[in-house]
Image: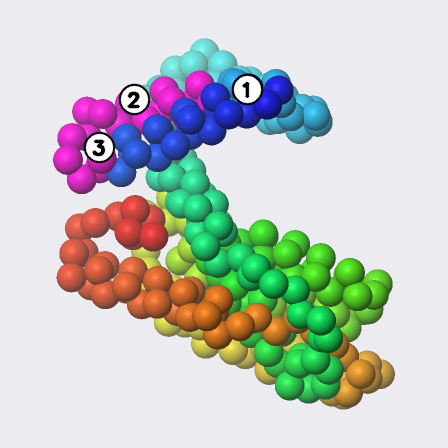
Amino acid sequence: MLYLSRLGGVFIFLSFVFSIYSYFFDNKLKMISVILIWLAFFILFFTIKSKKLILTLLFFTLISFLYSYFNNFYIDIKKAFSVNLYLLTLLISVGFLKLITTPKKDKEELPRGKISFIKTYLGVHLFGSIINLSALLLVADKMYKKAKLSPLQIIVLTRSFASDAYWSPFFVAFAAALTYAPNLNAFSIISFGTVIAFIAFFITYLEVIKSKFDLDSFYGYPLSLQTLYLPLVLAFFVLITHYLYEDFKIILLI
């Protein structure tokens, strides 16, 4: 199994390289990237313990193709196998970001109170905007090591993470939107999404201080500034580059 995982990892990395190269230099090489990522899928499929959901989705996909074929609907086979290539490329690059943004040291004593609440919320939000679900699991694990998660901590973790989908160009939901609605205005989405994310934070904060939760006893896991500056810098460069080179796919810039 370890051998299969390593081999699949090699194919995933090569697919990532070819997808980037083919977009900027030679589009003919795109199919090599597609073939490599599908080879990685077939290899890694055997390493998955629970295959039921994947097999179910593949079954319904096959049924849909057969229905379309026998009813003379047009099927773009090439696009069917490659439509999510750039989405997968983004997910691969986000995986690399996890290696350089993960905090190395645990905190001995977790801070408490309102300031801790705000810092933890913003920390998980910004950290999750880059490495997605890994941020939520990482911070939740750090907090759980100290004590069982309280309802207030669960609220902070889930809402701060979920609101990333409103604006973060690195979030999987955003990438999916770019894939299936390629002509949307990314700048507008990020701008309005950021405002909505702030509103979501204030709603959560007001709900917490007016409810039965004891905010003064709340302890969180605020992340350091060195970890959090990366999401803001990367998002800034994505917007600037997209402004200068409008023809570039935003999902590739990400």
Residue bearing the label numbered 2: 32
Taking 190 as reference, is 146 left or right? Answer: right
Q: Residue at x 57, y 59 (%)?
A: 104
Q: Position of residue 70 (x, y in %)?
A: 45, 11
Taking 164 as reference, is 116 left or right? Answer: right
| Residue 217 picture quarter | bottom right
Q: Position of residue 109 (x, y in %)?
A: 73, 75
Can you say whether 43 is above or below 86 in the image?
above
Residue bearing the label numbered 3: 22
For residue 4, the mark is: 1
Mark 1 or mark 2, earlier in chain: 1
Magenta residues (range): 21-40
Q: Position of residue 126 (x, y in %)?
A: 50, 67
Taking 182 as reference, is 157 left or right? Answer: right
What distance separates the C-alpha of mark 3 from that of mark 2?
A: 9 Å
What distance separates the C-alpha of mark 1 from that of mark 2?
A: 20 Å
**Residue count near mark 1 (Cα–Cα under 10 Å), binned few <14, some 14–19, many ≥20:** some
What distance separates the C-alpha of mark 3 from that of mark 1?
A: 26 Å
Mark 3 or mark 2, earlier in chain: 3
In front of the other: 99 or 212: 99
**SS category of the residue bearing label 2:** helix
**SS category of the residue bearing label 3:** helix
Can you say whether 252 is above or below 104 in the image?
above
Q: Residue at x 47, y 29 (%)?
A: 9
**SS category of the residue bearing label 1:** helix
